[in-house]
Image (cartoon, rainbow, N blue to C red):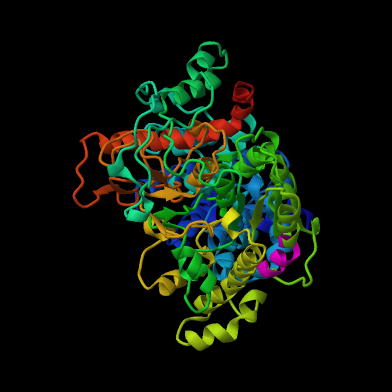
């Protein structure tokens, strides 16, 4: 046995199976095998493109590096054990990443997966089990290299190391492969994904998982490269001066949206911040660049809706998995009513911010585009930052009560730390919120029943205005009768109306009936207390229900909507924003393109809050100081995250740019300048990168003293 483990005579037969070539090529081929396997199973990534060459070179370099390291170890038994351990860990990591892609539609960094592992297993154990079952073919194929290694380890890591000339050649080939791949990655069109815009989700399709893991570790130690900020700076904005709004750009196409009084001159939503002066006195180059960027922005103009709800109450809801197909006149009548009354948004989107629920919620709560910070999301990073521009703090400063609730585990995604840091008095299940039934998912109706009476009575009896925030959970997937309590609760009603739909689509409609009951309860309570006219309800989803897309490629979301598109298309993320109050007698149609990051600045304007519109990624949707067919940095702009490594899609009042097709389609009858698309690309890049820097540099803390 000792001779066998030390590479003695017991290995003669196995060495002959492969010869010297097996020892030199096994690990490079094994790494490439894993990469190609992952790519084959990823239906959203084209298999044959230039990325395949980069992946081949990076895989060869990584495999040769492992070969050299093991070859240099003087203890051959230890070298063989180490080789097996590395192959085993590689298989596990690739399987976990494939599982993340199947469950969330994303590739995650190892650091983030480590942080979230406990929460995911604790909250979604049954979902994880289902994903694992579906991944059995991938799992079995992933462990083939390890099985081959166990059988041939004596030939792969022979008893004697390679001769020095062979090692030099291996090292030279390694350097050549790595250098060539590096040049292809940093001198071409994907440079930003390799450097300052690196995330595992965008890096894996372009460079492979092996390179993405190396970059994650490298940037965790040395920091992510700084973006070339000067290339994002727009032309300086003219000095803002009050002017009448451009009636041709009004957000409403109906007479009900027009002002009943003669036109007036409007000011701008700004604070007393001299960004140019701040830039001149700033020594930190990055912070100085943020000041310079802010100085180029045109603030949004106040308008007929400015202060419309001043002094009144706000209820803001981020609804788990809510999207337009959940609205059904018979099954969800309250959703149907609220979506057609109040402000009616015809061109609203909730993009996939590549961070699942926490990204969508961050966008809704902050008005800032969610970015990644290594293994941390923007929401997680915000705990250590000043978040003074959130609605929680702004309403608290106005003397409002600011309660917040979530009907799932109170600490999930760290909400017990993030939400108080955004100004809210937060409670969740297991931390201040008690619900009568402990099921998965919990009931949104029960959450409303447990919370609404408190702040309503405080307003009616004591005159205490409120801004309440909710994060719901009843609409969470998977969507089936066995694992979703809210779907089971309403199964009979959905099956009766839609007997021919798939179980997945039926279950999605069914669980959203619980959300509808929660809204019905809320509206009834407001009306019974006589304060529906004093309250604005705002709600949208955190993301489209991506768990309706199965691992085998079956897309039940398309079935439910009745038309085909795919993940990455802007139409996939078109959604509904509810904005309802009993005080709005006639519907107000809003046609401008907008997303979840526009909610906070729009509400700041509606409630007449003191704010600076330049400090947000989004804009007040009612501001009209722009021309639909002309570029400006204050025009309506819906930005979509680069979730497939293809770039950012976007929509303006002039048309739609689809990153997957690299095409801009202008709206009917609209003509734009020849440099329009190029300038919007630059503006989109600026919004994404400066949104990251706002959080990274704790920018709100730097400008806060000037607001007093």
Res. 470 visible in picture: yes
For the stretch drawn in magenta, the main secondary structure is: helix
In the image, residue 572 lies in the stretch drawn in magenta:
no
Q: Position of residue 373 (x, y in %)?
A: 59, 38
Q: Position of residue 324 (x, y in %)?
A: 46, 65
Q: Quadrant of residue 235?
A: top left
Placement of 208 over or under 398, stated as above or below: below
Q: Position of residue 659 (x, y in %)?
A: 35, 48
Q: Residue at x 71, y 55 (%)?
A: 460
Q: Residue at x 55, y 59 (%)?
A: 104
Say whether residue 165 is left or right of residue 636. Answer: right
Q: Quadrant of residue 282?
A: top right
Q: Quadrant of residue 633?
A: top left
Instruction: Name the residue nearer the viewer: 348 or 113.
Output: 348
Q: What span is in magenta? A: 444-452
Residue farthest to the top, as pictured: 281
């Amino acid at each position: 046995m000792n001779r066998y483990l030390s590479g003695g005579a017991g290995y003669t037969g196995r060495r002959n199976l492969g010869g010297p070539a097996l020892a030199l090529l096994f690990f490079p081929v094994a790494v490439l095998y894993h990469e190609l396997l992952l790519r084959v199973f990823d239906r959203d990534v084209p298999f044959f493109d230039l990325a395949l060459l980069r992946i081949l070179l990076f895989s060869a370099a990584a495999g040769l590096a492992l070969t050299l390291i093991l070859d240099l170890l003087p203890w051959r038994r230890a070298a063989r054990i180490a080789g097996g351990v590395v192959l085993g860990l590689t298989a596990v990591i690739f399987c976990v990443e494939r599982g993340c892609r199947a469950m969330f539609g994303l590739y995650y960094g190892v650091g983030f997966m480590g942080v979230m592992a406990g929460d995911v297993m604790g909250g979604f154990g049954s979902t994880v089990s289902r994903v694992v079952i579906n991944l059995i073919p991938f799992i079995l194929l992933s462990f083939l290299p390890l099985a081959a290694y166990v059988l041939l380890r004596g030939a792969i890591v022979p008893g004697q190391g390679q001769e020095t000339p062979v090692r030099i050649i291996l090292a030279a080939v390694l350097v050549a492969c790595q250098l060539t791949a590096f040049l292809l990655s940093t001198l071409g069109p994907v440079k930003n994904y390799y450097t300052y815009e690196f995330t595992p989700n965008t890096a894996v399709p372009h460079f492979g998982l092996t390179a993405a893991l190396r970059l994650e570790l490298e940037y965790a130690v040395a920091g992510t490269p700084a973006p070339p900020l000067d290339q994002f700076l727009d032309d300086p904005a003219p000095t803002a001066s009050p002017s009448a709004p451009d009636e041709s750009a009004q957000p409403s196409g109906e007479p009900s949206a027009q002002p009943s009084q003669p036109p007036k001159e409007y000011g701008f939503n700004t604070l007393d911040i001299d960004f140019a002066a701040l830039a001149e006195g700033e020594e930190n180059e990055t912070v100085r660049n943020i000041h310079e960027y802010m100085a180029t922005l045109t603030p949004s103009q106040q308008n007929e809706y400015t202060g419309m709800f001043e002094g009144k109450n706000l209820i803001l809801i981020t609804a788990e998995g809510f999207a337009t197909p959940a609205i059904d006149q018979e099954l969800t009548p309250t959703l149907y009513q609220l979506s057609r009354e109040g402000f009616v948004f015809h061109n609203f989107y909730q993009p996939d911010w590549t961070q699942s629920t926490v990204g969508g919620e961050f966008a809704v709560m902050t008005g800032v585009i969610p970015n990644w910070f290594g293994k941390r999301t923007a929401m997680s990073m915000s705990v250590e930052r000043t978040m003074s521009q959130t609605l929680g703090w702004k309403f608290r400063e106005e003397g409002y009560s600011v309660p917040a609730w979530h009907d799932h585990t109170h600490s999930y995604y760290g909400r017990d730390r993030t939400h108080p840091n955004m100004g809210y008095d937060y409670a969740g299940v297991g931390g201040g919120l008690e619900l009568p039934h402990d099921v998965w998912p919990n009931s949104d109706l029960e959450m409303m029943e447990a919370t609404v009476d408190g702040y309503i009575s405080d307003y009616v009896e004591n005159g205490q205005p409120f801004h309440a925030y909710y994060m719901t959970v009843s609409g969470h997937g998977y969507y089936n009768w066995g694992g979703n309590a809210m779907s089971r609760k309403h199964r009979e009603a959905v099956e009766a109306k839609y007997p021919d739909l798939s179980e997945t689509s039926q279950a999605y409609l069914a669980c959203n009936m619980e959300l509808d009951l929660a809204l019905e309860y809320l509206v009834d309570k407001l009306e019974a207390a006589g304060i529906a006219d004093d309250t604005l309800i705002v709600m949208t989803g955190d993301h489209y229900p991506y768990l309706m897309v199965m691992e085998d490629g079956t897309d039940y979301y398309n079935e439910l909507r009745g038309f085909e598109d795919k993940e990455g298309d802007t139409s996939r993320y078109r959604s509904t924003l509810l904005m309802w109050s009993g005080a709005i007698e006639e519907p107000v149609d809003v046609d401008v393109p907008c997303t979840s990051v526009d909610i906070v600045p729009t509400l700041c304007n509606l409630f007449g809050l003191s704010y600076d519109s330049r400090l947000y990624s989004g804009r007040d949707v009612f501001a009209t100081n722009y021309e639909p067919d002309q570029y400006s940095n204050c025009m309506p702009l819906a930005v979509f995250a680069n979730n497939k490594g293809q770039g950012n899609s976007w929509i303006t009042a002039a048309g739609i740019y689809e990153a997957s097709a690299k095409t801009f389609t202008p709206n009917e009858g609209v003509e734009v300048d020849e440099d329009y698309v190029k300038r919007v690309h630059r503006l989109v890049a600026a919004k994404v990168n400066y949104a990251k820097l706002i959080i990274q540099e704790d920018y709100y803390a730097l400008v806060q003293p000037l607001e007093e």
